[in-house]
């Protein structure tokens, strides 16, 4: 019985040559003959072909060598040393022990070790020289919290650097070294960039200094969730940890951005990189150099996305724009006449397709600037003049408590699936509102399906102000079944619109 047959695929050319050799050998053995060698004429050697004219590429591709030769020396490596706490150091309890957090909060017994031990952390980044007298631009996260900053030039000369200033919101920092006649990189205009243009990044990825990578611009004015004031340049230029703060060049050798972050699942480059436009960077640098406070535009509104259900509930033809959920008292939006439920679709002549675009458009406007804002109210278009305000400094808000209300004031609204009570005077004063009812309990029904929870406040239903549980019950009774209805819900100082669909 024959055994199992295994096969091994070979390269096609090798397999054909092997098969030919076997056939010839088999043929010779079968005939029992050995042929004498046949004498053939030796061909004349072929002379090597030389080309006197310079080689020309068959395909036109960008050549970045002149750019690097001229402006590569303006790119610097930035190394920093900082100190950070060692998590859990000196704690005798394991992290899952109930005493672990107790020990972390109160420290070691007898007052020892109140200050957690620290360790030195070294990191690398990149930057570029913007002026020959030693001013250097980089990303703020490269040098933030750094105790010592060392800048190393392309010729390997190292200098201690002083932090002139930084902006966390714009992730931009300005450094100064004591040096003269330094090579510089020219500043371009990031507004002239177009999708598809070639760009070049130079930096120190993973510590490999003066590394060059290239790609094309894949999107412009890209908002990101954690950096709502930066209109990022998206490209496919490979950048990695260490590239942060380095320049992004266009084909003219001009800096059009500084490399900032990547989209990744594994910590390395995956095809999406984001750079801060140089126009945004330089507006910050000018303020940092002059020691001026950096100001951001402010409207005083909370906005949310417009979902298809919400668009239908608000009588909109399509789900676009930014839905105004709440308005701060005495804010630019309040003075301009904006209302909760308005949908902002244009700002200063620029369209607002999604909620992420609005903070970017507003934040980059200088405070005091007068603009037109386009809104949809009850499905009708309005244009409102508004003066952009100044974003206030963040302040910690106190914890808010609602005083107890008598059980007799609680009204059950079965069709909505909640029990509600009037707002206390204390709660209205703390929240700065004079409308709404507090949800005491949530039963099975429309409210629970929409995510309403006890403690929330219903301010509007079907774009009508709610002032008492009895009024809310009357509004609920008059709403048709299974029709999408907008409801304005507040939790603490934040408000959001949700869609309710009531049963029969």
Image (tube, rainbow, N blue to C red):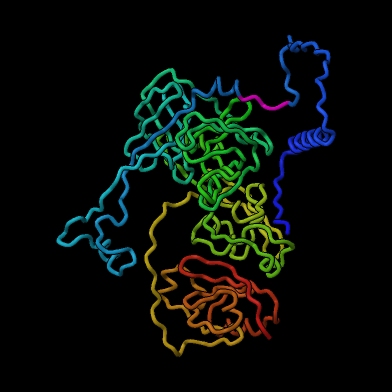
- For the N terminus, the quadrant is bottom right
* In the displayed structure image, the side of residue 204 where residue 165 appears, left or right: left
Residue drawn where x is 64% and y is 38% of the image? 217
Front-most of residues 230 and 95? 95
Q: Residue at x 77, y 12 (%)?
A: 46
- Visible residue check, residue 365: no
Q: Main secondary structure of the magenta part?
A: loop
- Residue 421 at x, y percent in the picture: 48, 83
Residue interval drawn in magenta:
60-64
Q: Residue at x 83, y 29 (%)?
A: 33
State the image quarter where residue 256 is shown: top right
**In the image, residue 490 lies at what x, y percent?**
51, 70
Task: Give the side of residue 182 with respect to residue 386, left or right.
Answer: left
Q: Is residue 177 above or below residue 475?
A: above
Residue at left offset 53%, top offset 50%: 228
Examine the rendered structure and indicate whether residue 488 appears above or below residue 477.
above
| Residue extending furthest toward the bottom | 408
* Quadrant of the frame with the C terminus: bottom right
Q: How many marks?
A: 0
Q: Is residue 117 above or below residue 338?
A: above
């Amino acid at each position: 019985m024959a055994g199992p047959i295994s096969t091994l695929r070979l390269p096609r050319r090798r397999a054909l040559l092997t098969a030919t050799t076997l056939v010839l050998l088999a043929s010779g053995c079968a005939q029992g003959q050995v042929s004498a060698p046949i004498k053939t004429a030796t061909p004349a050697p072929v002379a090597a072909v030389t080309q006197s004219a310079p080689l020309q590429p068959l395909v036109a591709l960008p050549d970045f060598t002149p750019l690097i030769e001229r402006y590569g020396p303006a790119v610097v490596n930035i190394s920093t040393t900082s100190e950070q706490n060692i998590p859990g150091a000196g704690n005798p309890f394991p992290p899952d022990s109930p005493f672990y957090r107790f020990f972390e909060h109160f420290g070691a017994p007898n007052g020892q070790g109140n200050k957690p031990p620290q360790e030195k952390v070294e990191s690398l980044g990149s930057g570029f020289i913007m002026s020959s007298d030693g001013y250097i631009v980089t990303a703020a996260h490269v040098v933030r919290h750094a105790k010592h900053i060392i800048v190393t030039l392309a010729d390997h000369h190292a200098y201690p650097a002083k932090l002139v200033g930084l902006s966390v919101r714009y992730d931009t920092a300005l450094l100064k070294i004591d040096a003269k006649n330094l090579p510089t990189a020219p500043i371009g205009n990031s507004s002239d960039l177009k999708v598809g243009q070639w760009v070049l990044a130079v930096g120190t990825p993973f510590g490999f200094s003066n590394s060059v990578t290239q790609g094309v611009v894949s999107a412009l004015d890209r908002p990101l969730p954690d950096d709502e004031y930066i209109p990022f340049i998206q490209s496919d230029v490979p950048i990695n940890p260490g590239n942060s703060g380095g320049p992004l060049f266009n084909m003219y050798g001009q800096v059009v951005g500084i490399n900032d972050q990547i989209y990744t699942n594994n910590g390395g480059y995956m095809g999406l990189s984001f750079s801060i436009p140089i126009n945004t960077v330089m507006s910050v640098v000018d303020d940092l150099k002059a020691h001026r406070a950096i100001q951001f535009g402010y409207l005083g509104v909370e906005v949310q996305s417009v979902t298809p259900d919400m668009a239908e509930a608000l009588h909109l033809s399509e789900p676009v724009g930014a839905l105004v959920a709440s308005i701060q008292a005495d804010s630019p939006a309040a003075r301009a006449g904006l209302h909760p439920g308005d949908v902002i679709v244009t700002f200063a002549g620029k369209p607002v397709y999604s909620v992420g675009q609005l903070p970017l458009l507003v934040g980059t406007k200088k405070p005091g600037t007068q603009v037109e804002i386009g809104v949809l109210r009850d499905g009708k278009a309005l244009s409102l003049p508004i003066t952009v305000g100044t974003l206030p400094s963040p302040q910690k808000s106190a914890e808010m408590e609602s005083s107890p209300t008598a059980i007799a004031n609680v009204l059950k609204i079965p069709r909505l699936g909640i029990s509600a009570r009037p707002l206390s005077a204390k709660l209205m004063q703390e929240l700065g509102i004079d409308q709404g009812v507090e949800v005491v309990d949530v039963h099975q029904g429309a409210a629970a399906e929409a995510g309403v929870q006890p403690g929330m406040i219903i301010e509007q239903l079907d774009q009508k102000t709610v002032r008492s549980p009895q009024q809310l019950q009357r509004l609920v009774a008059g709403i048709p079944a299974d029709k999408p209805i907008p409801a304005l819900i507040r939790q603490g100082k934040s408000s959001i619109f949700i869609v309710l669909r009531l049963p029969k």
